[in-house]
Image (cartoon, helix red, strand yellow):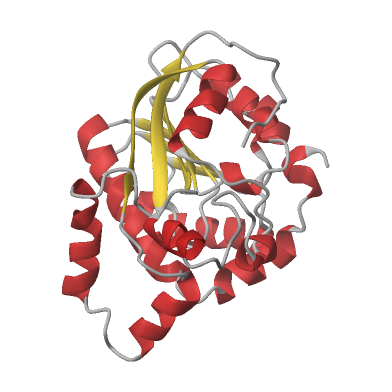
């Protein structure tokens, strides 16, 4: 399957929009990303995959923002939200196919948020990202965590045979890989990046469906969700999602391999 081109983008958009707890998970992810942007203060940002709420809606202090989004529904929504802001460009394509429209070395920051695990040949995406980097570009990658608390609990309960098994929900969302921090870092360094730092965020004790049920009956208050976000400092590496922050380095393996 040739990278993102082979995905059923329409089915993915529909599954994403109907996913039970994903809106809350996306809010926690956005909180982490805004903390990152606050620390990095980038002026020229490339956001690869934006979903329904591009980060330019929440981070106005930029000089230029490019969104590359293959989903026609999500790309149209991003254009609508950008309005007449001439600083924002939305390209409806995969990053690999959009490479000819994007000049290398022009971005301070490239965001691959909630994306890498969804790509069959994620090595191609990382290679395309690496080619766009300048010497000072920093790249952020986040994906679901194979060693999250809820997966560890499921394994100990005998519900899953392995932490890296693909769940039914992951299949619905066309997610091809499960990563832990070690495998994610190995993949990124193999494709030409050096790791600046890494970690996890937002402790999620139960599955998306179970968390949605708790939310429906009013148990997941804003204060509790905030506590679960902060709890990761006491349970390092067990958050629901993991991240690596990268800078250009030397490749150590064949581009196109995907070890996740």
Which quadrant would the N terminus be assigned to in this image?
Answer: top right
Find the residue positioned furthest to the bottom.
217
Is 112 placed above or below 100 here? below
Say left or right for 119 vs 137: right
Q: Residue 19 appears in which quarter of the rendering?
A: bottom right
Residue at 65% in and 71% down:
14
Residue at 63% in and 54% down:
165
Is 103 placed above or below 23 here? above
The foreground one among 123 and 139 is 123
Residue at 58% in and 62% down:
160
Residue 116 location (% of width, % of height): 58, 41
Say left or right for 204 vs 79: left
Is 34 placed above or below 248 here? below
The foreground one among 227 and 51 is 227
Asked if one can make out residue 234 in the rendered structure from this viewpoint, the answer is yes
The foreground one among 5 and 216 is 216
Which quadrant would the C terminus be assigned to in this image?
Answer: top right
Q: Residue 169 appears in which quarter of the rendering?
A: bottom right
Q: Residue 196 appears in which quarter of the rendering?
A: top left
Residue at 40% in and 63% down:
25
Residue 97 location (% of width, % of height): 73, 34
Asked if one can make out residue 83 in the rendered structure from this viewpoint, the answer is no
Is 91 placed above or below 148 here? above
């Amino acid at each position: 399957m040739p990278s993102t081109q082979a995905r059923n983008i329409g089915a993915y958009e529909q599954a994403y929009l109907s996913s039970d707890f994903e809106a809350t998970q996306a809010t926690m992810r956005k909180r982490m990303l805004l903390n990152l942007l606050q620390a990095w203060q980038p002026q020229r940002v490339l956001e690869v995959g934006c979903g329904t709420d591009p980060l330019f809606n929440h981070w106005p202090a930029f000089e230029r923002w490019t969104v590359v989004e293959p989903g026609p529904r999500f790309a149209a929504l991003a254009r609508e939200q950008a309005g007449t802001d001439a600083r924002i460009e939305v390209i409806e394509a995969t990053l690999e196919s959009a490479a000819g429209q994007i000049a290398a070395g022009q971005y301070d920051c490239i965001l691959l948020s909630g994306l890498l695990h969804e790509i069959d040949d994620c090595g191609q995406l990382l290679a395309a990202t690496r080619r766009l980097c300048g010497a000072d570009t920093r790249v952020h990658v986040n994906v679901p965590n194979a060693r999250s608390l809820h997966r560890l609990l499921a394994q100990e309960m005998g519900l899953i045979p392995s932490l890296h098994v693909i769940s039914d929900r992951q299949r619905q969302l066309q997610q091809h890989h499960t990563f832990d921090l070690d495998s994610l870092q190995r993949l990124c360094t193999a494709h030409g990046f050096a790791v600046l730092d890494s970690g996890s965020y937002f402790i999620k004790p139960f599955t998306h469906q179970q968390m949605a049920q708790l939310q429906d009956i009013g148990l997941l208050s804003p204060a509790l969700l905030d506590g679960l976000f902060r709890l990761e400092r006491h349970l390092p590496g067990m958050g629901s999602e993991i991240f690596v922050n990268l800078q250009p380095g030397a490749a150590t393996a064949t581009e196109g391999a995907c070890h996740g």
